[in-house]
Image (tube, helix red, strand yellow):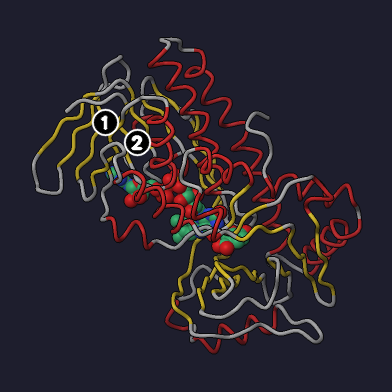
Amino acid sequence: MRTQVAIIGAGPAGLLLSRLLALQAIDSVVLENRSRDYVEARIRAGILEQHTVDTLTAAGVGARLQREGLEHSGIHLQYPGVRQPLDFPSLCGRTVWVYGQTEVTKDLIAAQLDGGPPLLFEVSDVRVEDVDGDSPRVRFTDADGVAQVLECDAVAGTDGFHGVSRPVVQGAGGRVWERTYPYAWLGILADAAPATDELIYAWHPEGFALYSMRSPSVSRLYLQVDPTEKIEDWSDERIWDALDTRMALEGWSVTRGPVTEKSILPMRSFVSAPMRRGRLFLAGDAAHIVPPTGAKGLNLAVADVTLLAQALVRLLQEKRTDLADSYSDRALARVWRCTHFSWWMTSMLHRSGDDFDAELQLSQLRRVCSSEAAARELAENYTGLPLDL
Ligand code: FAD
Ligand code: DHB
């Protein structure tokens, strides 16, 4: 088998990259080790920056997003007794969109299977070879158990945090930075109309809570919990009661409904550099993880592949290496900005430490809620900064 770009991993990064390359007449093959059902059902992020929406729309996969996505012009920041709206258009001239990662993935897979480049599910034993030369290859076993070799000009490692690509890059040297946080998120999806028009990020002495949504009839809510907590110990009733406590505001209440999914997510920051070794390029969670507060993970993956698609087009069509050579540095500048923003939002809103830490957090929250300059800094980062920083 031969293609121009072998793409490992059919998450949003790999699928979108394949699509962006196809639009520039570059062929690719996407290899995914899970089943289509599994990939489409994996519940993750829900907030898209304007840049992400524009990229998906320009790539021809924005029709349902334009129809069903909810445009949000801000968020609420809350601490006891205060719920402060931040209006993004007046602060920075941009908005964000609520549209689940599951839906982005479904739209990309549907487009891919409708005449797009090959997308192979349930492959196993994926190995990347000879990335230091001009003719790398990927060996894998297909869904029928047949060993395959995919010869190519470049490999995109978009196989997430637990993939096989990052170790290959790090094998030639490099560095990782990591921070684990002393808390996790318990997330639920509920068939309940959201009781708020915009997301609410709430600080509370008992821990952070976030009110988000997926549609006018589906709520997505999160609670800060200890990372050692077991989901079995959290009945629906206990979750709703904790949400009521942490999001309490006079004359307002959380709307309850049947819980259709619940899980606990660990939280970490992680950056691996460089994002390239020879003809192997990393993008998305394969190279970096941010804690979810601030909703940057998916958007960062989209920004990476936007840069990577440009670099691969230049390399494979024009035979020029400048964008391939600058890819890692350009991507990492943005990665570190989002790493800082996600760490800052996380540190400001989650309870840990002592009363001194709590007072610092409250002081920072009051500052963002009262200073236009401080609010603008949050708004610019939340809605997404330019591709090149
Ligand atoms: P992924 O979506 O991880 O895709 C990688 C793909 O590669 C997967 O399909 C995987 O099955 C496949 N793969 C792995 N190994 C191999 C292999 N060896 N061979 C072939 N294929 C392989 N971000 C937010 O902004 N907000 C959130 O609320 C949020 N919640 C999250 C919850 C969870 C549980 C997780 C894990 C992440 C969450 N994120 C969230 C982050 C966001 O979902 C990711 O940043 C985003 O999915 C990154 O996309 P990606 O394509 O780089 O990686
Ligand atoms: C969602 C996730 C986030 O991390 C966030 O900051 C806002 C919303 C969500 O899943 O809806």
Whichever of labels 2 and 1 marks the residue nearer the N terminus, that label is 1
Element type at mark 2: helix
Q: In the rendered image, which residue does mark 1 sit on? A: 128
x, y percent for residue 94: 73, 46
Q: 338 above or below 203?
A: above
x, y percent for residue 167: 36, 35
x, y percent for residue 101: 48, 56
Question: Which image quadrant shows ligand 2?
Answer: bottom right
Q: Nearer the viewer, residue 80 or 119?
A: 119
Q: Is residue 315 left or right of residue 389?
A: left
Question: Image quarter for residue 3?
Answer: top left
Q: Is residue 185 visible to the viewer in this orientation of the structure?
A: yes
Q: Nearer the viewer, residue 52 or 249?
A: 52
Q: In the rendered image, which residue does mark 2 sit on? A: 165
> Does the CB distance between marks 2 and 1 fall below 8 Å?
yes
Q: Amino acid at mark 2?
A: Ser
Distance, label 2 to label 1, CA atoms, is: 7 Å
Q: Residue furthest top?
A: 319
Element type at mark 1: strand
Is the shortest distance between ligand 1 and the CB of mark 2 under 8 Å?
yes
